[in-house]
Image (cartoon, coloured by chain):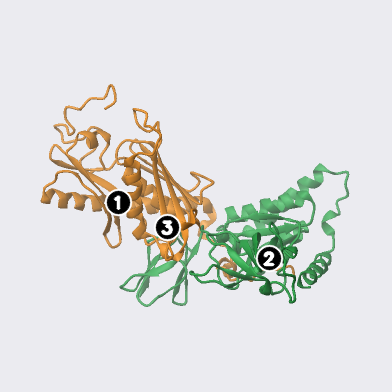
Chain colours: A green, B orange
Amino acid sequence: MATFFENREIVVPGQLLAEGRYRSSFGTYVSADDEVFSALVGLAELRGNTVRVVPLHGVYIPREGDRVIGTINFVAGNNWKVDIGGPYGASLHANNALRKPYDDDISKYYDVGDVIAAEVATYDRTTGPYLSMKGRGLRKLKGGTIVEVSPAKIPRVIGRKGSMINMIKGKLDIQAMVGQNGRIWIRGGDLDSLQIAKKAFKMVADQSHTKNLTDRVAQMIDEELAKMHQNDETEETEESSAPEDGEETEDEEEMEEVNE
Amino acid sequence: MSPGEEKPDYLINPEGLRLDGRRPDEMRPLELKVGDVIRNADGSASIKQGNTYIVAAVYGPRELHPRHLALPDRAYLRCNYRMTTFSVPDRKRPAPSRREREISMVIRNALEPALFLEEFPEAVIDVYIYVLQADGGTRCASINAASLALADAGVPMRSLVPSIAVGKADDTLLVDLGDMEDKYGGGDVPMAIIPHTESITLLQQDGSFTREELLEAMRMGINACKVLHERQKDAIKRAYVREAGEDDDEYEDDLEADLGEAAIPGED
């Protein structure tokens, strides 16, 4: 029984992490003699007696229950084919998205090119992922724009209990939705705030394993906002104090619309 | 042979040193770079081994086209080894040669056992390897670079795969042959291993070796591979520590979130 790494150390594939009765979790594998090896480049973590490696790169691997943001690729009978990134296309059955009775031609609800927020209902390696849109906040995302980051960085984009994403949303007065598949949908504010938001997300992705990131991102946003206000001093400076409640009610409305 | 190139009088001089001044068991200077070599790729790496210069890029796992090649139980590893036309003294013809196709296959076979391909059925992992400058040992250098690029792309793998050739000139065994030694020496044995288990994933032979010579060559090769493996690990760690900056020894305390366990905030 021994471990051979410091917590949060960068490990490489094939590196021996632990020996003896340790449980192997994500990003690791066990050899015949109970040795746990890393399978990825990432940060090694020990929790209880479970060893795992938090990846630093990688494609999106669906997991049941994941919230994802996808683009409709194809309408097939009463299925939608959805691109959610990663190696597999997902499908969404109308029964899992619409309230019955729904029209035979389901393209009038969501059509090719539409962006949706959905949940991975089932996934195993032999069947592709199946999505569901029954759930709070799962709906068609109208307008807005999408920023893509590596799926491995998404937890960092969210931050502890949403600290990072809420900070960015609050400071820039935008709406945002994060999908586990590495896509971040943002809308609202003015063009400049969206630009700053994009820059903030890229910054999080680039510096995802450094400390005090939330503070530094906040500082960067403040600087950018200050610059923006300098540039158009003629305009009033109260843009950023729009009420936040507005966004919530609006979204509720949209959800209703979808469910009908 | 290119114009101006002549067979050297000896490959090992009376002092026992090679053409470039190396000792028989000495490798060429090695320079590895991981990540940010090709930005559009999911993972990339480059290797300079003596004058051999190779870049490797990995895409995927992604959806496989054409669809009929898909394997129901694992990902299809597609290796594409190409020599650029300017990589050799006489311009190489641009069309893919028999040799390139064979080396592509050899590289795929060498890498496949190290990858968890069964995690991605029906998908494809594309590995593109471009030889920018060839000076011997390109297939081994390609395997080194490709395995780094695969790790950079986040493909789950059992191990990195170091690879090296051991050859023979004037009845002396030499590690990591250069171009001249390859052309005028008495043969070579390229090999690739999985270091932890010492399983061999590539072993070829060109020229004739006695039984004892071959065993000794493999022993030297495995040692050299282990040295190389340390350099590979180093290169990856360096790449990510650089990315992490000076603060990499301490992390923000949002551990929960970092482990992917945070709920995704909707807009509530």
Residue A224: horizontal and vertical position, in percent? Answer: 73, 48
Question: Mark 3 or mark 1, which is nearer the start of the sequence?
Answer: 3
Q: In front: A191, or B255?
A: A191
Q: Which residue is mark 2?
A: A117
The quarter holding residue A259 reads bottom right
The 10 Å Cα crowd at callout 2, few under 14, some 14 to 19, many 20 or more, is many
Residue B76 circle label: 3
**Which chain is disc 1 placed on?**
B
Reply above or below: A12 against A234.
below
Question: Contact, CB < 8 Å: mark 1 with mark 3?
Answer: no
The x and y percentages for residue B151 are 43, 55
Q: Nearer the viewer, residue B210 or A75?
A: A75
Identity, as a three-letter code, of the amino acid under mark 3: Tyr
Percent position (x, y) of residue A108? 75, 63
Task: Describe the element under mark 2 as helix, strand or loop.
Answer: strand
User: What residue is rendered at 66% in x and 59% in y?
Assistant: A184
Q: Chain of mark 2?
A: A
Q: Which mark is residue B227?
A: 1
How many angstroms separate mark 1 from mark 3 (CA)?
Answer: 30 Å
Q: Given the image, on which type of amino acid does mark 1 rest? A: Val
Q: Would you identify the image quadrant in which residue B132 lies?
A: top left
Residue furthest out toward the top: B4
Mark 2 and mark 1 on one chain: no
Seen in the picture, residue B231 relative to A256 is either above or below; the reply is: above
Mark 2: amino acid: Ala
